[in-house]
Amino acid sequence: MKIRTGFVSNSSSSSFMIFGIYMDQQEVLKLLLREKEDVDTVISELLEGIDNVSYGYGPPESERIYIGRCCNTIKDYETGKQFKDSVREAIRNIFGDAVECRYCEDAWYDG
């Protein structure tokens, strides 16, 4: 019998937790007054040069987009408040005060 001790790379489940925002892709474009553009292109352009924030999509066939920072990226010298403030500032520079940052987590299983 073989016992697997390493990471299982063929798993069809996924989960994550970030500090930031999530919303429908079309809502993002509407908020940015760029409704006729591709959300991936728009967000990539807006986040270019911003080191501490990234984005990703929700479960397959979902229209959700997540924008924020993974909790495991907190630096040793950084406090929780500094971590959150850096994310808030980056997202405020994109969306103004129209959105509020919070912890976002999601998980799904493609079975």
Image (tube, rainbow, N blue to C red):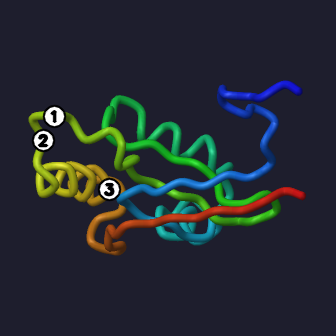
Circles 2, 3 touching at the beta carbon (< 8 Å) = no
Q: Nearer the viewer, residue 2 or 27?
A: 2
Q: Which residue is mark 3?
A: 91
Q: Nearer the viewer, mark 2 or mark 1?
A: 1
- Point out which mark residue 1 bears: none
Measured Cα–Cα span from mark 1 to mark 3: 23 Å
Circles 2, 1 touching at the beta carbon (< 8 Å) = yes
Measured Cα–Cα span from mark 2 to mark 1: 6 Å
Residue type at mark 3? Answer: Ile
Q: Position of residue 36 (x, y in %)?
A: 68, 58
Q: Which residue is mark 2?
A: 78
Point 64% across, 65% down: residue: 64
Measured Cα–Cα span from mark 2 to mark 3: 19 Å
Q: Which residue is mark 1?
A: 76
Point 38% across, 60% down: residue: 20
Up/down of 10 relative to 58, above or below = above
Point 62% across, 70% down: residue: 24
Q: Nearer the viewer, mark 1 or mark 3?
A: 1
Q: Nearer the viewer, residue 52 or 94?
A: 52
User: Secondary structure beneath disc 2?
Assistant: loop
Left or right of residue 97: residue 38:
right
Q: Quadrant of the C terminus?
A: bottom right
